[in-house]
Amino acid sequence: MLPLVPWRTGEDPEELRRITHRMEGPPPEVHRAVWQIIKDVRSDGDAALLRLTAELDGVELRPDQLRV
């Protein structure tokens, strides 16, 4: 449920912009991170999946544990 924010004419217009700002999707740094992961997996395949799983999830897997 969205919070109700009372607003009176004449209040700080910057505050109004801040609370009504709507992002169009995730921030740019998220897009960059996702595209880097996709690039790594495309170029390094399973090795990248294993490395990223360890790095991002803290789980060490062996190649024989990967399932599609």
Image (cartoon, helix red, strand yellow):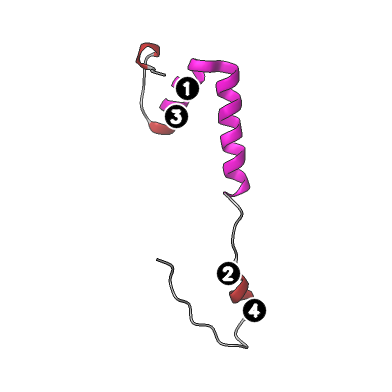
Q: Earlier in the sequence, mark 2 or mark 4?
A: 4
Tag 1 residue: 49
Q: Secondary structure at mark 3?
A: helix
Q: Secondary structure at mark 1?
A: helix
Please state the horizontal and vertical placement of residue 57, each as a whole percent of the image: 39, 32
Q: Secondary structure at mark 2?
A: helix
* Most foreground residue, 68 or 8: 68
Please state the horizontal and vertical placement of residue 21, each as a whole percent of the image: 60, 65
Q: Amino acid at mark 2?
A: Thr
Residue count near mark 2 (Cα–Cα under 10 Å), binned few <14, some 14–19, many ≥20: few
> Which is more foreground, mark 2 or mark 1?
2
Q: Amino acid at mark 3?
A: Glu
Q: Amino acid at mark 1?
A: Leu
Q: Earlier in the sequence, mark 4 or mark 1?
A: 4
| In magenta segment, residue 1 | no
Q: CA distance from mark 2 to mark 3?
A: 36 Å
Identify the residue shown where x is 44% and y is 20%. Answer: 50
> Which is more foreground, mark 3 or mark 4?
4
Please state the horizontal and vertical placement of residue 6, each as a whole percent of the image: 49, 82
Q: CA distance from mark 2 to mark 1?
A: 39 Å
Q: Residue furthest top?
A: 64
Residue count near mark 4 (Cα–Cα under 10 Å), binned few <14, some 14–19, many ≥20: few
Q: The C terminus appears in which quarter of the rendering?
A: top left
Tag 4 residue: 13
| In magenta segment, residue 45 | yes
Q: CA distance from mark 3 to mark 4?
A: 43 Å
